[in-house]
Amino acid sequence: MMIRVCKMFRQGLRGFREYQIIEPVYRRNPIFSFWDKKKQGRITFDTTDFIAEEGHFPPKAIKITQKKPSWREEHEIQVLRNILQSLDSFQNYTEPLQLLLAKVMRFERFGRRRVIIKKGQRGSSFYFIYLGTVAVTEDEDGSSAFLDPHPTLLRKGSCFGEKALLNTSIRWATVVCMEQTEFLVVDREDFLANNLDEEIQKDAQYRFELFRNMDLFQSWSDERLWQLVALGKIEKFSYGQLITKDLAESSRIIIICKGSCEVLRLIDLGTSPYYYKWIWQHLELIDDKPLQAHLNEPDPMVRFKEFQIKSYPVQDFSSLKLLHLQEARKKQEISFSEPTKTSGNSLPRILGPKIKSKCTHSVRCSMLKTKFGELPKEAAVGAYMKIHTVEQGEVMGFHQAFFPENQCDMRPFILVSLGAELIQLRREKFLELVDDETRKRLTEMEVEYPSDEELCQKFLKENSWNIFRKDFMRLLVEPHQRPTFIPIPPQKKGIYNPKSLVLDLHNINKIKPRHPIFMAPRKYLPPLRIVQAISAPRHKIQ
């Protein structure tokens, strides 16, 4: 009973630093050793030094942070620096500053609802989030974060409270833990004692010179430019890394300092009339086999009649039949007693079917109703389209502030890095510093993006050209002389398959493919399948 009670206490008190309770990990052989012939001695290896729960700060690193900064050895500081490379905010600092931060930081773990920073108090510490989530609120106790459906959250890799290291300024917001959170804390006393303020000042001077060399801020005074420097710091994003999911809803001004970024747009092809027409034009050829002879070609006379019917506009000729009946009944002095609905020529159009083609190809699959008509459910897909490249010195995220709502493009745009260094500033703080001349320059930098319909047409034209190019190369290029026997390589297991990003209209009415598909989440709408190409039935290229 005592063992069970102690186990319950350990599980309940785990995470509270006041008790310093560490749950031991039992293994069959936690420590083992072996004889080294070269060193003529026994080498011992303790596996418990490297045991940690998934995502948590390693126990070996916690032991290092419990030492005083002056007691830490160089290899221990290097170990801490290597562990902290997983934090995005830590990577933004230079290597000398990373080593100095690893020398002075300590480890803290707090539970849910613990207030880390209180609004109105003077700050004395700087925090890196290693695990967990915190919320930034305007109240003093942080209770609004648990009532707000969309609070401002900071997750693993973020940092806050950096300004408190340079001056004892008053905190402008409250930071509260949304769950059990692990921090690496830098105190102001240790920060100043190890001359970290000099490295921070070098970084601020670099940002100042960067802004001074930009054409946008040529008219600004040094005092106002230093105010801008204090609003943000340089962040590094690797190639392909997501910067923001929605530029329209972002409350940040983004200044590209080095490198470039791409602006992407997720388009829903099913909402385009051009796509709807394109799909059904290709589904009419569902029985055709590209680059092969047609096996079931109809008789030439039948094809000629079909051509005549398809070439003539589809109309309802029942009015001609009704006109003949009216003339016949006039001769017999018989009139209609019931009123009928008439069109412009006072002849009803409800007697007789429309002329349709005989050789229609039925597509048997689940349909989706759109405002243009029915569309196969499998054909309701989307694609990411690149619409703009942002180069060094350009500014993003300001158009919502300078233009009225009816002129703003509020579509969600995605910003992805191509290997860039940038500075993110709070929009309201940035607008307080902007003068009329800067506002005019920013409006001149505004880029008008194409509509979704234009992007859809561009996607389909590029897709048609890529398909034609592949077919043309297959037709002209002679196949390579292959040996009689080709060993089949073992298939590597993986989630990616080239067919995953291709919509195959040939098999749209067959069994679903076994390879995985990629779905993109959307706000207030169901997820959308993402494709890079569409393989459609087509005529013989010969």
Image (spheres, rainbow, N blue to C red):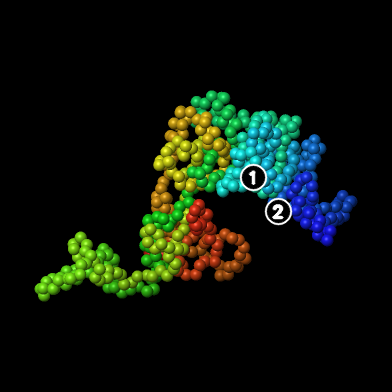
Residue 367 in sight? yes
Q: Residue, x 48% and y 64% (percent of image)? A: 479
Q: Residue 235's spot in the image, x, y percent? A: 60, 39
Q: Residue 382's spot in the image, x, y percent? A: 47, 56
Q: Residue, x 60% and y 61% (percent of image)? A: 494
* Nearer to us in this view, 520 or 347: 347
* Nearer to us in this view, 486 or 492: 492
| Vertical relation: 300 (above or below) 179 | below
Marks counted in the figure total 2
Front tag of 1 and 2: 1
Q: Residue 301's spot in the image, x, y percent? A: 27, 73
Q: Mark 2 highlights which residue? A: 54
Q: Mark 1 highlights which residue? A: 134
- As helix, strand or loop, the secondary structure at mark 2 comes to loop
Name which residue type carries label 1.
Val
Quadrant showing the C terminus: bottom left
Name which residue type carries label 2.
Glu
Q: Which is more N-terminal, label 2 or label 1?
A: 2
Q: Residue 480's spot in the image, x, y percent? A: 51, 63
Q: Residue, x 55% and y 62% (percent of image)? A: 516
Residue 37 in sight? no
Q: Residue, x 46% and y 67% (percent of image)? A: 507
In the image: residue 328, left or right of residue 396: left
